[in-house]
Amino acid sequence: MIFLSKSDTEMLFDWPAAIACIQDAYAARNRPESQPGRLVAHDRSAWIRCMPSIPAESRFMGTKQISRTRAGRLAYVITLFDKETGALEFVMDAVSITAMRTAATSAAALRRLTPESSIKLAVLGSGLEATHHVEAIAHTCRIESLAVYSPTPANRQRFAKKFSDRLGIEARALHSAQEAVAGATHIVAAARSRDEAPILFGSWLEPGAVVISVGSTTLAQRELDTSVIEAADLIVSDVPEELCGDTGDMAAAAKAGVATQDKLYSLHQLMQGDVSPDLLARGRTRLFKSVGAALQDVAFAELLAHAAARQGVGTRLGVALHIKQSAGLNT
């Protein structure tokens, strides 16, 4: 059994490989029962979440678990089991994996959602998710200009300077979300408001804008105003069944009477070519709303596992689980 630490996973990481990994995972014909969604156990303010996945055409099956203490301390771990032998082969600290796979998934979706090779990007947020999203998107298309807004002036200014220097582009730190979005062809919303009020509105969007939203993943969280959901000609989600019932943005839209069933597609459908080209054409307002899925975690973890084996990275633990033979065969 090999343990990969946070620093190990960050050292092994590669954006092009990660984006391609997510594309391949969603292009494969995964059986619904191999991706059953998340299970959460609560005890007052403490909780633990388990997300299992058996990706098609992979060596491993696995789970991601997230635990939160009553004091607000979070831990993330991914386990990978060999499908054939049943051995627990890898245990990984998944805190960095989670942020990196989220951005890789958004970039993979954007590559299919937009025909543009050059974009004007606006980012709402200046934290880790926002940073990773700009890095990932820069590997899928040319960022012509960058505008950023976050509530803390020093943070947004630091963010703008970082990417101005790194990408050699004009990057501006703006005083409001509306100013940042003005004129943008593509928008990344990666920062919920402090009071859970929407931070992006449909009237701000340019015709044909592409929006990536990753900051609202539970009923208690808000990021997009209902007008953004209404304005979208196409909505793609990694987990549509959880999106509609478990996120504050979509719940608010449903309560307001905004119909989404005829324009909502899964990321599997997008990657497998099942979305009408007309919905992907210039002039269509397109929204990718991510809530995160175990398929992303386990597929990405397998990518890191293979890289670790090639490079001799990780700590080998001198323990193994006892493997028991089941009484019958699976069907």
Image (tube, rainbow, N blue to C red):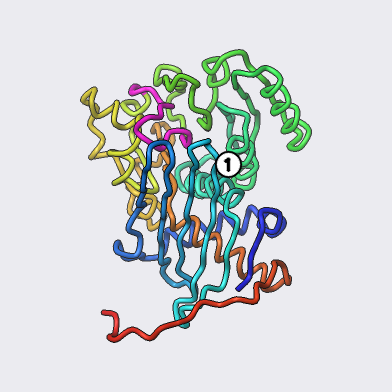
Q: How many marks?
A: 1
100 to 193, vertically: above or below: below
- Residue 213: x and y in percent read 46, 34
109 to 58, vertically: above or below: above
* Quarter assignment of residue 198: top left
Q: Is residue 186 visible?
A: no
Name the element at disc 1. Answer: loop
| Residue under pointer 1 | 117
Dominant secondary structure, magenta: loop
Front residue of 197 and 231: 197
Give the magenta range. 213-227
- Residue 134: x and y in percent read 62, 38
Tell me what residue is drawn at x 56 percent, y 73 percent: 89
Front residue of 149 and 276: 149
183 to 277, vertically: above or below: above
- Residue 192: x and y in percent read 49, 27
Q: Residues within 10 Å of mark 1 (few under 14, many from 20)?
A: few
The amino acid at mark 1 is: Ser
Front residue of 115 and 292: 292
Relative to 253, is 291 on the left or the right? right
* Quarter assignment of residue 225: top left
Q: Which image quarter is the C terminus in?
A: bottom left
Front residue of 296 and 94: 94
Q: Which residue is most to the right?
A: 165
Tell me what residue is drawn at x 23 percent, y 39 percent: 261
Relative to 186, is 52 on the left or the right? left
Relative to 322, is 262 on the left or the right? left
Q: Is residue 192 visible?
A: yes
Q: Inspect the magenta stretch and tell me whether residue 58 lies in it.
A: no
Q: Which image quarter is the N terminus in?
A: bottom right
Tell me what residue is drawn at x 64 percent, y 52 percent: 15
